[in-house]
Image (cartoon, rainbow, N blue to C red):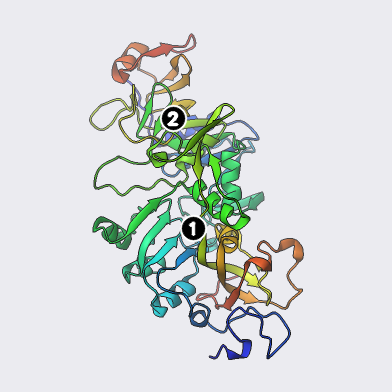
Amino acid sequence: MSILKTGVPGARCHNFCLMINKIVASAEAALADVPDGATVMIHGFGNAGMPGALIDALIAQGARDLTIVNNNAGNGDTGLAALIKAKRVRKILCSFPRQADSWHFDAQYRSGELELELVPQGTLAERIRAAGAGIGAFYTPTAYGTGLAEGKETRRIGERDYVLEYPIHADYALVKADRADRWGNLTYRKSARNFGPIMAAAAKTTVVQVREIVELGSLDPETIVTPSIFVQRVVRIAPAVMRAA
Amino acid sequence: MMKKLDRKQMAARVARDIPEGAYVNLGIGLPTLVGDYLPKGREIILHSENGVLGVGPKPSEDAFDEDLINAGKEPVTLLPGGAYFHHADSFGMIRGRHLDFAILGAFQVSTGGDLANWHTGGADAIPAVGGAMDLAVGAKKVLVMMEHLTKEGKSKIVERCTYPLTGARCVDRIYTDLAVIDVKADGLHVVEVVDGLDFQELQRLTGVPLKKLATAA
């Protein structure tokens, strides 16, 4: 598959066409330029919303020394767990690494190969949101008086105590959505929405794997959750297993 | 002979106190059981951190949808009137004091209402916090469910938590297999004890000072 027909992935193709076309032919092409040392947000809560095809392509692509932002630190042997197993991850920011099946993370964390920044889940979400929204920092009541606020600036505002937290920016966000058009407008499915909209806004380059690409104008504007401005590249990945309707 | 509550009875006891119209988050583990015992006919809206309001019961095996799970990553359904939203909105609901109740498990609760439920603090333990700290500071009322005593027979209600804190002075009420206890500014008030247990024996088992409500046995 060639990406030349649409020019540089995600860019407008001045010489070939005059239309915006963020559709990229393959997951591999969509992630070809991820450099070593990149910060990559990976959407998903457990398996819901996890962009499996994009993670597989990132593993094949070979970038290493990655900083990963996700709610968890991988389950079983696939997806983010496989990326960790392949020793591509230097640091992970997440809220809930320890799971019954997080053995690849556990081993590398215990051996000191993998650095962990543990962030309360709501603080993680808000730090990601803040990055996409241009916020410099914010005060949150979460974690005040606990070990996770140690060394952080605090402030009493009114009757409550708060902890100062900074945004998390990323070079790339890998997102799984349900449907997209060629501009990159996105709809999601059920609780698989989770981190998608905020990660899409927080990264310089947002790469989205979708079940279906539809004609521009056919997504109901009232149902578009991530508007196209937050999306750079879209890849269609057919679902592995067809579900009965 | 005192009749300790089993896990199901504890869940049913907590469920009884959740009023019509409440927005409630059930923590993973023991608190999730509360959902099975909410009184029929009472409209209660369950929130799940991963972005669901109006969480319904488990689906049948053939209706399982991997895109619809709860915070414990178990398959769930959506009730009519339910809604989906992203993570920042979900935690905005929590921190923004919109949830009426968070029901959480615990390792320890202190007499001042400090909660420890996320980390044993062991050198080899891998920490994982999830949404516990957000729920502890955010919900209007924080209800804790736990066994009264550790396996070694020590009280989990303590003067000061020895495990790392999830939140300071955040617990409103404690439901154990032995008693229901309110955490108030002037100390711990026993609301209820199980059959066959009197206040003096509960006080002996608990160690820290308890106050007896006029209505308690």
- Name the residue at 43% across, 41% down: A152
Is A29 located above or below residue A40 in the figure?
Answer: below
Q: Nearer the viewer, mark 1 or mark 2?
A: 2
Quarter of the view holding residue A236 = bottom right
Report if residue B111 is visible in the image: yes
- Name the residue at 58% across, 60% down: A193
Label 2 environment density (alpha carbons within 10 Å; few <14, some 14–19, many ≥20): many
Residue A58, percent from left and from top: 43, 75
Is B72 located above or below residue B111 in the figure?
Answer: below
**Residue closer to the observer: B79 or B51:** B51
> Looking at numbered disc 2 in the image, what kind of residue is underneath it?
Ala
Is A70 located above or below residue B130 in the figure?
Answer: below
Q: Which residue is mark 1?
A: A45
Report if residue B33 is visible in the image: no
Q: Which residue is mark 2?
A: B168
Is B206 located above or below residue A94 in the figure?
Answer: above
**Label 2: chain letter:** B
Across the whole image, how many numbered discs are drawn on residues?
2
